[in-house]
Every structure is written in C-alpha cells, then in structure tokens.
Amino acid sequence: MHHPLSTFLLALCAACAPIPPDAQVPLAPDAVDSRDGLYRLELEAVPQPYIAGRTAELYIEVASEGGLDPTAEVSVKPWMPDHDHGISPGPVVEVDGDGRLRAEWVFSMPGYWELTLQLDGVAGSDRAVVAYEVD
Amino acid sequence: MKWTDALLPVGLVLAALPQTADAAACCVGATSALPTRVGECEKAVVAMSVLHEQTMGWWDEQGQTTEAVGYTEEAWIGNLGMGLRLARQWELAARLPLRNNHLAAGSLDSVGAGLGDARMLALWDPTVERPPSLDGAGPTPVGIVGLRLPTGRDWTESDDPLNADVTGLEHGALIVGGQLERTLGAWPWSAGAMAEGDLQVAGRPTGVLLGNATFGRYFGSGWTALLTGTYTLGQADPTGTSATTRQTAAGARLVRGRPLAWRVWAGAEADIPVAGLGRATAQTTSVGLGYAHVW
C-alpha cells in the first residue's frame, strides 16, 4: 500500500505532464443531459461570459421523457475544483415562470468553475455538471 | 549613458569586494540567506515582517497568461515569527500571519481581515556548517517537519461574496521538507523542497509542494544580497479530476544583520508571467520588509 504522502507526491509529479481536456464536463453548454440520463436541461447563462463580482444568472428548463417537468426542484452548487472551494452564500433558485427556473449568485473570482445541478423531479433524482470560464 | 549603465561599475566593485575572513559558525546570523533562522550559536529569534501582495493577472486552465481586467486583489500580510534553538541539532519555529485582504470585482468592493493559518515547525540540522576554507566545508542539510494549523477563516465560514474575509485554508496540513543551506562565506545559498499534505480524508491526497532556492553574495558588514526563486505545485481537488495549479516566481532580497543582535531585510518577488510557468491561479507580485531580534 502506498503511503499517503508518496501518493500525494506522485500525484503532483504526474500533474507536470500536459493537461488533457476534461471531456466529462461540458463548457458553457446550451443543453446538457443529466448523468443518469433522466433529464435534459436547457440552459441560458446571463451574462455570457460570466464576470466575477457581478450577478450571475442561470435559466434552467428541465425536461424528462414525459416532457417538461415544471415541478422539478433544482439546487445549484458552484465549485472551483482547482482551488477546492465554492461560494458563500450559495445560489438562490426560484421559479421564473413558463416552467423555467432562475438561479442567481456571484462568482467570487475569475477562472474555471463548475456548476453541479442537483435535480429532483418526476423521473427521480439525478445531477448534471457544467463548466464556465469566468472573466 | 543610461542610469542603469552607471550602476554596472558599482556592481563590479561590489562583486569584487573581498569576502570577510571566514568566521566561526556562530556568525551564521550575519550572512544568513534565511533571516528568520536561528543560527548555530543563537538561542532565539523573534521576527516581524510585513508583505504587500497584489494580483497582476492569471494563468488559465491551459497555462496561458491573461490580464486581471476588472478584478483587483491585494493583501497586506503581517507575519509574527519565532525561532528557538532547543539543542545543537534542533530548532523550533512558529509563524502566525495576519491578513488584510482587499478585493474588487464587478460592482463589488470588499475588505476582510483576520488571523491566517499558523505554522509550527521542527528543524533538524545534524551537521555543523564549516567555513569554506576548512576541510569538510559544505552545505548543511536541514530536515523540516511540522503542522499548518487552520487558525484562519476558510471559505465555508465566509460572509463575503468575494471571500475577502477568507484568511486561511479549510484543512490543517502535515509539513515535511528538507533543504541544503550554505550560509557562511561570500556566496550563501539554499535549495530545498517542502510538502504540505492536507489533513483531510475526503478523497485523494491534496496539498502543496513547494521548491525554493536562494543564491546570494555577502558583501561584508553584514550585508547580503540574494536572488530567490520559488516553484509551487498545488493539488486542491480531492476527487483528483483537476490538474495541479502551478506558480513560478523570482525575486530579490537584501539582508543586513549583526550577529546575536538583529537582522533586517527587504525583498520583492513576482510570478513570472510566461505561458506554461503557471496554471489556474493568480499571478502575484509582492514586496516586503522584516525585522528579527536575535538572542
């Protein structure tokens, strides 16, 4: 078994290699399928690109196999994986009408951020992760 | 002739100054490249320093440099330090930073301050450094082990939308390091590496690996000028899906000391804004002053 410190040092050394693009997380998509395929999300980011220190909005439309799911509950968690931190306070999500949800928050700094959208609707629980480069 | 050209002969004269006679090891304080280190015949050091750090730009995910347009981040960082020699081979060191952060982005402008993360270190230097003219002279190895304590406010405790009140990291860390030091003679230098492994069990190991080097010239009368270099790798993501952050910095430091009395220093360091020398983190510059009282 590797010692945790040696594992840590090996992980750091491995990181000296060229950085492969992360194919798992779509960058600023207009639509995305949830991880288990239960939902399809239509997304509209405002403004685009997002700007640190200014209000960021994400309009979300949730659909399952049965069509639009206006009853779906969505929580949004911004995360900066390179620095292992999120934002505090977190986003506020409210119903925007026409079956859309609107999330609002402020990015604390520029850089690469991921948003985890936790979904609970008629098809069950699922989640989706999308990424944004924040100016 | 430009004024910088006029400095050249001055520099040549300074470089040609004869080094002072090789002193006993306990004069390490006067020539030290590391002004907060307790010399071999010193008992204790209490140090205070202040540093101003400013973000000038960013390295993005691909390591390209970008400007920090519309984003300002600066901090005044005070450091209280203490070193205590317990025995010929052992030294205890402690450092407590105090941070005052100012961030501005978009329409927000925030200031926050507080205690940073304290560090407690034990340093082991098993050999006596000998002056260059003596047999067996050479660099001294130093082993370092310690803890970073989460005494600062981390992002989960922040009340500020720009995290200006964040002064520390979420986890404590185990610190392990080592370096070679040559503090006697006319050309002091040091080179070493230190790992701070976060004390967290959520996933894969996270932390920081830091390599640093100093190389200087002792001019006599307690004056030493040094060039410094630092390379930092950080892995903060316990899921292991993110590549490491990287920073490469270079700087200079001027140290003046009197053995068993005091040391003062001034320095500046800047991340080198060249593509590939950093990734996914800020490019910063810093200037600082310090004073250490020695017993």
Image (tube, coloured by chain):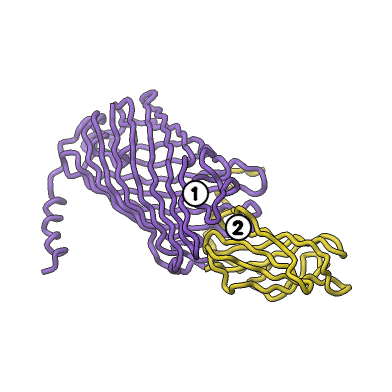
Q: Residues within 10 Å of mark 1 (few under 14, many from 20)?
A: many
- The amino acid marked with disc number 2 is Pro
Residue at the limit of the structure toward the front, as seen here: A97
Asked if B44 appears above or below A111 in the picture, the reply is: above
Element class at badge 2: loop
Q: Classify residue B188 as left or right of residue B177.
A: left
Q: From the image, which quarter does the N terminus of chain A lie in? A: top right
Q: Position of residue B53 (x, y in %)?
A: 38, 53
| Residue at position x 59%, y 53% in the image | A85
Badge 2 is on which residue? A81
Between marks 2 and 1, how big is the CA–CA gap?
18 Å
Badge 1 is on which residue? B209
Q: Residues within 10 Å of mark 2 (few under 14, many from 20)?
A: many
| Residue at position x 66%, y 54% in the image | B239
Q: Position of residue B150 (x, y in %)?
A: 54, 39
| Residue at position x 24%, y 48% in the image | B225
Any mark on residue A128, and which? Answer: none
Q: In the figure, the yellow chain has which letter?
A: A
